[in-house]
């Protein structure tokens, strides 16, 4: 099976799965609205749910419009890693949670909202080059991708920390650690494919850190943005 055919099958499956997830999230939002008088921190909880729906909707949208792949990582393991990394945190649904204090509830929900909003912004910047698998479509090096090479994973990490705090158990921490390891492997596989597809990637990787932004890099990004000419119209 060639990479384009594999990608189109994967696109169909992703759209189907994430459409089901959106439907479940919308039902959950309706339940939250119906129980607004019985829930603590209702506004924050609803906001978190709304942004979750927007994020999954963005995943579906950019999956529909994405470019065909130029190349993909060979072998089964990169594909299994991508799938496991995408859905690992869903295993928390089957795990018992622990009651947490109100301050921790506030912190965890705010982290989830922040991470989800940042994830949406990263998806928007990726645009038609978005992919769950380790696939080269187009080299994106601007916006958050000018600060670190994998800002989407960084944004998702903020969300995951919030989810783990909200769950409040050691097994949740372990699942979060497994998720982080999977994302690191995914990033490595993606970089291998991008290096092969885009000769400019090596220079980009030398200039931009992988996951942890430096202050100098952030200031340079701000200076480039302020120095850019304004668009007319």
Image (tube, grey):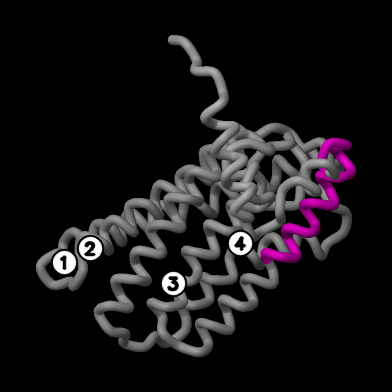
Residue with the mark numbered 2: 32
Q: In this view, does 108 lie to the left or right of 120?
A: left
Tell me how far mark 4 sits from mark 2, CA to CA.
25 Å
- Residue 208 spot, x, y in % from top left: 72, 48
Within-10-Å neighbours for mark 2: few <14, some 14–19, many 20+: some
Quadrant for the N terminus, please.
Answer: top right
Give SS at disc 2.
Answer: helix
Which one is closest to the eye, mark 3 or mark 2? 3
Check whether the beta carbons of the residues at disc 1 and disc 4 lie within 8 A of each other.
Answer: no
Name the image quarter holding residue 204: top right
- Name the disc covering residue 86, or none: 4
Name the image quarter holding residue 47: bottom left
Q: In this view, does 144 lie to the left or right of 10?
A: left
Q: What stretch is highlighted in magenta?
A: 183-201
- Name the disc covering residue 57, or none: none
**Residue ID at (62%, 40%):** 220
Tell me how far mark 4 sits from mark 3, CA to CA.
15 Å
**Residue ID at (58%, 47%):** 218
Magenta residues, dominant SS class: helix
Tell me how far mark 1 sits from mark 2, CA to CA.
5 Å
Within-10-Å neighbours for mark 1: few <14, some 14–19, many 20+: few
- Residue 90 spot, x, y in % from top left: 51, 70
Check whether the beta carbons of the residues at disc 1 and disc 2 lie within 8 A of each other.
Answer: yes
The first of marks 4 and 2 along the sequence is: 2
In depth, the one of 131 and 162 nearer the eye is 162
Which one is closest to the eye, mark 4 or mark 3? 3
Within-10-Å neighbours for mark 3: few <14, some 14–19, many 20+: many
- Name the disc covering residue 163, or none: 3
**Residue ID at (57%, 37%):** 125
The first of marks 4 and 3 along the sequence is: 4
Residue with the mark numbered 1: 35
């Amino acid at each position: 099976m060639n990479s384009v055919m594999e990608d189109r099958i994967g696109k169909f499956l992703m759209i189907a799965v994430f459409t089901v997830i959106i439907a479940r999230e919308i039902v959950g939002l309706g339940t939250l609205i119906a129980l607004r008088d019985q829930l603590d921190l209702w506004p924050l909880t609803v906001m978190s749910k709304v942004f979750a729906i927007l994020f999954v909707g963005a995943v579906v949208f950019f999956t529909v419009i994405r470019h065909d792949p130029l190349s993909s990582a060979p072998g089964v393991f990169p594909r299994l890693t991508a799938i496991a990394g995408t859905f690992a945190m869903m295993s928390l649904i089957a795990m018992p949670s622990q009651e947490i204090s109100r301050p921790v509830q506030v912190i965890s929900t705010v982290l989830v909202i922040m991470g989800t909003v940042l994830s949406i912004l990263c998806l928007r910047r990726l645009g038609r080059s978005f992919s769950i698998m380790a696939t080269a479509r187009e080299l994106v090096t601007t916006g958050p991708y000018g600060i670190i090479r994998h800002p989407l994973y960084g944004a998702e990490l903020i969300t995951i920390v919030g989810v783990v705090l909200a769950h409040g158990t050691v097994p949740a921490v372990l699942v979060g650690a497994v998720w982080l390891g999977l994302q690191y492997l995914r990033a490595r596989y993606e970089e291998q494919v991008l290096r092969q597809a885009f000769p400019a990637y090596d220079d980009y990787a030398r200039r931009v850190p992988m996951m942890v932004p430096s202050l100098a890099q952030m200031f340079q990004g701000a200076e480039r943005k302020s120095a850019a000419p304004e668009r007319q119209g």
